[in-house]
Amino acid sequence: ALQIQTTSAFVPSSRIRASPATSTSPTTRNDIRRPLSTTSLSASPSDQDDDDTKKSSSLPSEVRRAFIASSLAALTYNAFTLGAPALGLFLPPGYERISPLQFIAALGDPDASSGNGAERWGLWPTDPGPQGLRLRDYERIMATESAERPSWLDSKDFFLDENAIIMPQPEFPMPPGKYLVTGARSTTTGLTIDAEGNWKLDEGKLFDVTHLPCRAARYRTTTTAEDSKAGSPMTVRKGDFPVMPGGIMPDVLGTNKEIYSVVFIIGKQSV
């Protein structure tokens, strides 16, 4: 039997709380319809301290809604990971099931159904969450020059998820092929990527196959950063996280930011 990972970058945490950037109004679809590839030089440390759980249990309505959304997203993820036979669902002819679930990091217009630039897309062959670092662990590793430092960690080029977990980078570029993709909402369709970096969905738009609770952004240090710690996970603002489903990933001081859509791969065209 397949095992479901309970610590995951792409299974939203049940410990979601309001942040200053997100507690004033619910997230709308328009948030993700902003350009998915954006460059910024601004500020942004996340990760909840353990004593946060001792605070008041009276959560704002926005947070309760986020908790419900995250719980549903986790159930959806688990359902896809369990596979079609467990759900009574079957893949279209010509596709082979991918298990465990794989994840595309996609850059592009959310309203587009085709385009180019897929050579800048990446693939997480497995959930990056279990390998990820919380900010407090990163700070401890850097302060002590610990041997626990993972080989993939690059403080000048790093990915964060919606809970400010530092994730391993996806594999670049995304391999060409025909994939069955979904955002675990209403659309499941074919995605073709060719060797020249062109991509095309059989149905729907990139937004339709984006899993909204899974947020991911890449941060790369700029040459203009004056503070020696700027442009690294050291300058992530903890108060900016967690990011609500569909929300915009925060800026980090001294970095250029690229926001990626996270797309689930549940099948690949058989040869």
Image (tube, grey):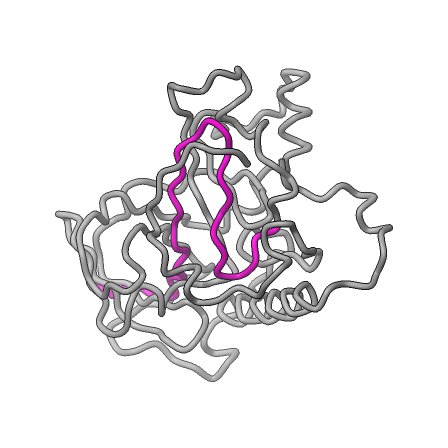
> In the image, residue 176 lies at what x, y percent?
21, 52
Q: Is residue 109 magenta?
A: no
User: Which residues lie in the magenta part?
Assistant: 242-271
Q: Residue at x 39, y 65 (%)?
A: 266
* Residue reaching furthest to the left: 196
In the image, is residue 245 part of the stretch drawn in magenta? yes
Above or below — where is 170 with respect to 97? above
- Residue 79 higher or lower than 241, as above or below: below
Residue 230: x and y in percent read: 52, 23
Q: Is residue 50 left or right of residue 247?
A: right
The image quadrant where one finds the N terminus is bottom right
| Along the viewing direction, whichever of 48 and 76 lies nearer the viewer | 48
The count of marks equals 0
- In the displayed image of the protein, which residue is found farthest to the front? 24
Q: Is residue 247 above or below residue 97?
A: above
Q: Which is more toward the observer, 124 or 68?
A: 68
- Residue at position x 61%, y 37% in the image: 237
The residue located at (50%, 57%) in the rendering is 247
Instruction: Residue 102: give x, y in percent of width and height.
Output: 42, 56
Q: Residue 68: horizontal and vertical position, in percent?
A: 65, 70
Between 139 and 28, the one lying in front of the other is 28
Residue 59 position by quadrant: bottom right
Outermost residue toward the bottom? 88
- Which quadrant: the C terminus? bottom left
Image-based side of 31 in relation to 143, left or right: left
